[in-house]
């Protein structure tokens, strides 16, 4: 069997060769170089989503906070939505019916922040990660989310889609929540 036959049999090929020229496609099919700021934001959002998965796995492995595990998984799916929003070029905003990050999603994070602040005493000081592995994973996720936020802000400054501005606010609140949960995790062991 040659490579073309193998590709036609695979409904979801991993290797498409579409990016071999250093370009990739946005949601509207337009092509840009892979070092474009749009892909920087997409890649960092993806990295943040994976970092949240590491946090969730650490909690599951220690049989800690099933509700927090569920909340993290819900946020992971919202990160996929955020990626879809960031894959929209300025002349092709999200299409009707495309999921977007909403103000309700931001408010849900603010509720998480308020609830978790009640569970931990936050000292007015800088923290060094590593008191616990779970806390360190949450701190790592927080820093990746902050980097994603910076990449999104660069995209927003270039093209300024409202839906992308909402992604920036969402990431800002998410990093705040992760900071608080990291402090909680450090206090558990």
Image (cartoon, rainbow, N blue to C red):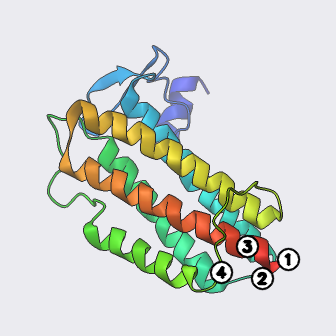
- Position of 120 with respect to 6 (left or right) is right
Disc on the earlier residue, 4 or 2: 2
Above or below, 35 against 116 in this view is above
Q: Where is mark 3, residue-wise?
A: 185
How many numbered discs sit on the rendered protein?
4
Q: Are marks 4 and 2 in contact (CB under 8 Å)?
A: no
- Residue 102: x percent and y percent? 27, 65
Q: Is residue 167 visible?
A: yes
Say the numbered circle drawn on residue 63: 2
Q: Where is mark 1, residue-wise?
A: 189
Q: Residues within 10 Å of mark 1 (few under 14, many from 20)?
A: few
- Position of 93 with respect to 184 (left or right) is left
Could you say which is closer to the camera, residue 127 or residue 45? Answer: 127
Q: Residues within 10 Å of mark 4 (few under 14, many from 20)?
A: some
- Position of 34 with respect to 55 (left or right) is left
Q: Residues within 10 Å of mark 2 (few under 14, many from 20)?
A: few
* Label 4, label 2: how far apart the Cα atoms are: 19 Å
* Label 3, label 4: how far apart the Cα atoms are: 9 Å
- Residue 145: x percent and y percent? 52, 51
């Amino acid at each position: 069997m040659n490579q073309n036959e193998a590709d036609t049999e695979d409904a979801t090929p991993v290797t498409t060769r579409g990016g071999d020229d250093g370009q990739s496609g946005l949601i509207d099919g337009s092509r840009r170089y892979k070092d474009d700021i749009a892909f920087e934001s997409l890649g960092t959002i993806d990295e943040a989503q994976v970092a949240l998965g590491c946090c969730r796995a650490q909690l599951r492995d220690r049989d800690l906070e099933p509700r927090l595990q569920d909340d993290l998984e819900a946020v992971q799916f919202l990160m996929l939505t955020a990626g879809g929003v960031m894959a929209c070029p300025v002349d092709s905003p999200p299409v009707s019916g495309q999921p977007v990050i909403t103000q309700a999603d931001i408010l849900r994070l603010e509720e998480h922040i308020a609830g978790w602040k009640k569970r931990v005493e936050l000292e007015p000081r800088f923290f060094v990660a590593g008191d616990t592995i779970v806390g360190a994973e949450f701190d790592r996720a927080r820093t990746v989310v902050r980097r994603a936020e910076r990449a999104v802000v660069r995209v927003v400054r270039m093209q300024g889609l409202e839906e992308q501005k909402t992604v920036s606010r969402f990431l800002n609140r998410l990093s705040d929540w992760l900071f608080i949960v990291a402090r909680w995790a450090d206090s558990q062991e």
